[in-house]
Amino acid sequence: MHNPEKETGEIKGELELVFTGDEFILPSDTRILEPVRNELERRLLAAGWVEEKIEKVLVAVDEAITNAVKHGNKNKPEAKVYIRLTLDNLDFKVVIRDEGSGIPDDQVPDPRQQENITKADGRGIFLMKQLSDKTEFNGPEVILYFKNDVQIN
Protein backbone atom coordinates (compact mmCIF):
# COMPACT_ATOMS: atom_id res chain seq x y z
CA MET A 1 0.00 0.00 0.00
CA HIS A 2 1.29 3.46 -0.94
CA ASN A 3 2.09 5.64 2.07
CA PRO A 4 3.03 9.22 1.08
CA GLU A 5 3.86 10.16 4.68
CA LYS A 6 6.79 7.71 4.73
CA GLU A 7 8.12 9.08 1.44
CA THR A 8 8.00 12.74 2.41
CA GLY A 9 8.98 12.31 6.03
CA GLU A 10 5.94 14.26 7.16
CA ILE A 11 4.56 13.09 10.47
CA LYS A 12 0.87 13.37 11.19
CA GLY A 13 -0.48 11.89 14.40
CA GLU A 14 1.18 8.67 15.57
CA LEU A 15 4.77 8.08 14.49
CA GLU A 16 5.25 4.66 12.92
CA LEU A 17 8.73 3.55 11.89
CA VAL A 18 9.83 0.25 10.43
CA PHE A 19 13.47 -0.77 10.92
CA THR A 20 14.98 -3.17 8.43
CA GLY A 21 18.62 -3.68 7.66
CA ASP A 22 21.36 -1.52 9.14
CA GLU A 23 20.59 1.84 7.51
CA PHE A 24 17.66 4.05 8.46
CA ILE A 25 16.37 7.21 6.79
CA LEU A 26 14.13 8.87 9.33
CA PRO A 27 12.06 12.03 9.61
CA SER A 28 13.74 14.94 11.36
CA ASP A 29 11.53 14.84 14.44
CA THR A 30 12.50 14.14 18.05
CA ARG A 31 9.65 11.64 18.22
CA ILE A 32 12.01 9.21 16.47
CA LEU A 33 14.09 9.00 19.67
CA GLU A 34 11.99 6.40 21.47
CA PRO A 35 11.52 4.01 18.52
CA VAL A 36 15.23 4.24 17.65
CA ARG A 37 16.15 3.69 21.30
CA ASN A 38 13.89 0.61 21.47
CA GLU A 39 15.30 -0.83 18.25
CA LEU A 40 18.91 -0.31 19.33
CA GLU A 41 18.26 -1.84 22.73
CA ARG A 42 16.65 -4.88 21.09
CA ARG A 43 19.61 -5.35 18.75
CA LEU A 44 22.25 -4.83 21.44
CA LEU A 45 20.59 -7.30 23.81
CA ALA A 46 20.35 -9.86 21.00
CA ALA A 47 24.10 -9.38 20.35
CA GLY A 48 24.91 -10.10 24.02
CA TRP A 49 25.63 -6.58 25.21
CA VAL A 50 25.35 -5.79 28.92
CA GLU A 51 22.69 -3.42 30.21
CA GLU A 52 25.19 -0.92 31.66
CA LYS A 53 26.89 -0.45 28.29
CA ILE A 54 23.54 -0.37 26.46
CA GLU A 55 22.44 2.57 28.62
CA LYS A 56 25.55 4.53 27.63
CA VAL A 57 24.92 3.77 23.96
CA LEU A 58 21.29 4.87 24.16
CA VAL A 59 22.03 8.19 25.87
CA ALA A 60 24.86 9.03 23.44
CA VAL A 61 22.74 8.14 20.40
CA ASP A 62 19.81 10.18 21.79
CA GLU A 63 22.12 13.18 22.07
CA ALA A 64 23.44 12.73 18.53
CA ILE A 65 19.95 12.40 17.05
CA THR A 66 18.66 15.38 19.04
CA ASN A 67 21.58 17.48 17.75
CA ALA A 68 20.88 16.31 14.18
CA VAL A 69 17.21 17.32 14.41
CA LYS A 70 17.63 20.60 16.31
CA HIS A 71 20.98 21.97 15.16
CA GLY A 72 21.82 20.22 11.89
CA ASN A 73 18.34 20.16 10.38
CA LYS A 74 17.13 23.27 12.24
CA ASN A 75 13.88 21.47 13.20
CA LYS A 76 12.81 21.38 9.54
CA PRO A 77 10.25 18.57 9.25
CA GLU A 78 11.07 17.93 5.59
CA ALA A 79 14.71 17.14 6.43
CA LYS A 80 15.98 13.63 7.16
CA VAL A 81 18.21 11.97 9.74
CA TYR A 82 20.33 9.11 8.41
CA ILE A 83 21.54 6.34 10.71
CA ARG A 84 23.90 3.50 9.82
CA LEU A 85 24.79 0.68 12.23
CA THR A 86 27.62 -1.83 12.42
CA LEU A 87 27.12 -4.24 15.31
CA ASP A 88 28.53 -7.49 16.63
CA ASN A 89 28.96 -8.93 20.13
CA LEU A 90 32.10 -6.84 20.80
CA ASP A 91 31.82 -3.61 18.80
CA PHE A 92 29.11 -1.17 17.86
CA LYS A 93 29.52 1.74 15.47
CA VAL A 94 26.68 4.13 14.75
CA VAL A 95 26.85 6.91 12.19
CA ILE A 96 24.26 9.69 12.48
CA ARG A 97 24.08 12.24 9.69
CA ASP A 98 21.84 15.23 9.17
CA GLU A 99 21.34 17.62 6.26
CA GLY A 100 23.25 20.50 7.84
CA SER A 101 26.82 21.61 7.29
CA GLY A 102 28.19 20.34 10.59
CA ILE A 103 30.24 22.17 13.19
CA PRO A 104 33.76 21.37 14.30
CA ASP A 105 33.49 19.98 17.82
CA ASP A 106 36.32 22.25 18.95
CA GLN A 107 33.97 25.20 18.32
CA VAL A 108 31.48 23.91 20.89
CA PRO A 109 32.12 25.51 24.28
CA ASP A 110 32.99 23.20 27.17
CA PRO A 111 29.83 22.99 29.34
CA ARG A 112 32.00 22.58 32.46
CA GLN A 113 33.47 26.07 32.13
CA GLN A 114 31.99 28.61 34.53
CA GLU A 115 30.66 30.86 31.74
CA ASN A 116 28.73 27.91 30.23
CA ILE A 117 27.28 26.29 33.36
CA THR A 118 23.90 28.01 33.07
CA LYS A 119 23.55 27.76 29.28
CA ALA A 120 20.70 25.56 28.05
CA ASP A 121 22.68 24.00 25.18
CA GLY A 122 26.14 22.57 24.77
CA ARG A 123 26.08 19.33 26.74
CA GLY A 124 25.23 16.87 23.96
CA ILE A 125 28.69 16.64 22.40
CA PHE A 126 30.27 16.47 25.85
CA LEU A 127 27.98 13.55 26.79
CA MET A 128 28.64 11.72 23.51
CA LYS A 129 32.39 11.95 24.12
CA GLN A 130 32.07 10.81 27.74
CA LEU A 131 29.76 7.87 27.05
CA SER A 132 31.29 6.45 23.86
CA ASP A 133 34.67 4.81 23.51
CA LYS A 134 35.47 7.07 20.57
CA THR A 135 33.62 9.95 18.90
CA GLU A 136 34.36 11.43 15.48
CA PHE A 137 32.86 14.45 13.76
CA ASN A 138 32.96 14.67 10.00
CA GLY A 139 30.88 17.60 8.74
CA PRO A 140 27.21 16.69 9.27
CA GLU A 141 28.16 13.20 10.51
CA VAL A 142 28.75 12.00 14.06
CA ILE A 143 30.36 8.58 14.40
CA LEU A 144 30.09 6.89 17.78
CA TYR A 145 32.14 3.80 18.64
CA PHE A 146 31.41 1.49 21.56
CA LYS A 147 33.08 -1.64 22.89
CA ASN A 148 31.17 -4.28 24.82
CA ASP A 149 33.55 -4.64 27.77
CA VAL A 150 31.66 -7.48 29.46
CA GLN A 151 29.63 -10.09 27.61
CA ILE A 152 26.63 -12.08 28.70
CA ASN A 153 26.96 -15.74 27.66
Image: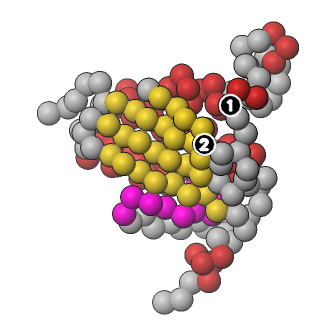
> What secondary structure is found at the residue carrying circle 1?
helix
Using the rendered image of the protein, determine whether residue 113 is visible from the camera's viewpoint: yes
Residue toward you, 129 or 19: 129
> What secondary structure is found at the residue carrying circle 2?
strand
Q: Residue at x 37, y 40 (%)?
A: 92
Neighbourhood count class around disc 2 (C-alpha, 10 Å): few under 14, some 14–19, many 20 upward: few
The quadrant of the image that shows the C terminus is top left
- Its colouring scheme is secondary structure
Q: For residue 8, what is the image quadrant?
A: bottom right
Neighbourhood count class around disc 1 (C-alpha, 10 Å): few under 14, some 14–19, many 20 upward: some
Q: Residue at x 41, y 51 (%)?
A: 85
- For badge 2, the amino acid type reads Asn
Residue lying farthest to the top in this orientation:
114
Residue toward you, 138 or 52: 138
**Magenta segment:** 21-32
Identify the residue position indicated by label 1 in the image. 105
Left or right of residue 26, residue 103 in this image:
right
Left or right of residue 90, residue 66 in this image:
right
Q: Earlier in the sequence, mark 2 or mark 1?
A: 1
Percent x, y for residue 19?
42, 63
Percent x, y for residue 145?
43, 35
- For badge 1, the amino acid type reads Asp
Asked if residue 5 is among those painted magenta in the image, a careful observer would answer no
Q: Residue at x 77, y 60 (%)?
A: 76
Residue lying farthest to the bottom in this orientation:
1
Identify the residue position indicated by label 2 in the image. 138
